[in-house]
Image (cartoon, rainbow, N blue to C red):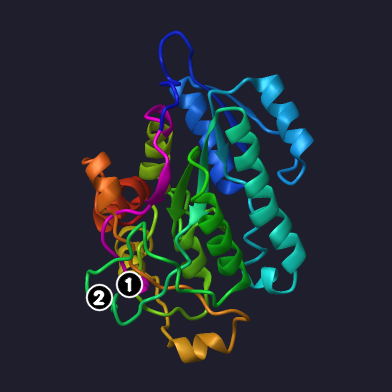
Amino acid sequence: MGLPANGSSEKPLRFLIYGRSGWIGGLLGKLCESKGIDFEYGSGRLENRLSLESDIAAVKPTHVFNAAGVTGRPNVDWCESHKVETIRTNVVGTLTLADVCRDKGLILINYATGCIFEYDAAHPIESGIGFKEEDYPNFTGSFYSKTKAMVEELLKNYENVCTLRVRMPISSDLANPRNFITKITRYEKVVNIPNSMTILDELLPISIEMAKRNLTGIWNFTNPGVVSHNEILEMYRDYIDSNFTWVNFNLEDQAKVIVAPRSNNELDANKLKKEFPELLSIKESLIKYVFEPNKKTVGA
């Protein structure tokens, strides 16, 4: 895109990260520490342009990462009743940060969402036909997803932004309540639908490498392939808790206990796989990065 190779020897990497109190933002900081990458967390509010400009002036970063955003507590249903707050951060804030970074000649790595699609006639469930980076979002069932689809469309005009479509993020920290595995093991009932998902232990280091390569544009930021709720829970039973049981229910029954519908889809990860051939399939990645490290020995 014409920007210099920011990671060159004459200018060492220095990251400015937004989202310190968030799950991905926290993991990103730990990752930078382990890799010896100089970084600072931004203190400015995303919707406050002057505070962002102040952060950039003070930190003098080579790259900016945005892991801040409103997902809602305890889940995205919160956004249905807090629409202005959701817009302020997810739309106004993200666009302001992208605009400030463009003014300063900086690449912005933006952790976005792939929950802006749902299976349809052209992308049937279990068909292996995933939504590509250039496909237009077709899921607006939740206000959260609606704001994310809006901002993704607008960010296409910013040549300095790298949009990473994260889905149902999973990490090896099975005690973390934001972890998709942790969530579904605690639900009274779960649906059983194949989905694209993001194994953070494998993909967050890749996002740092993407910054080093100055990659921009939209990327489906998921492991190749799909995995269903039951397949994950079967792995959980086999590796973690042999006594674990669960109960399924269908989408109609799920709809009775949630405010907003949820996105279910497969994203095509070929673009990411081509750039990073070592990228594991979702099931391989789950075993290598999540279940093997947490494996409980028999009789323990």
Percent across and percent down for residue 112 are 51, 53
Percent across and percent down for residue 192 are 37, 78
Front residue of 299/207: it is: 207
The residues tagged by marks 2 and 1 sit, at their Cα atoms, a distance apart of 7 Å
Percent across and percent down for residue 272 are 30, 47
Point 61% across, 64% down: residue? 147
What kind of element bears circle 2? Answer: loop
Mark linked to residue 271: none
Q: Which of marks 2 and 1 is nearer the N terminus?
A: 2
Asked if the stretch drawn in magenta spans residue 136, the answer is no
Estimate how packed mark 1 is, as few (under 14), some (14 to 19) or many (20 or more) residues with alpha carbons within 10 Å.
Answer: some
Which residue lies under the disc numbered 1?
A: 194
- Is residue 195 left or right of 74 when viewed as pictured? left
The amino acid pointed to by label 1 is Pro
Front residue of 256/181: it is: 256
Percent across and percent down for residue 53 are 72, 30
Front residue of 217/39: it is: 217
What kind of element bears circle 1? Answer: loop
Which residue lies under the disc numbered 2?
A: 126
Question: What secondary structure prevails in the magenta region?
Answer: loop
* Magenta-drawn segment: 211-230
For the residues bearing labels 2 and 1, Cβ distance under 8 angstroms? yes
What is the quadrant of the N terminus in the image? top left
Q: Is residue 137 visible?
A: yes
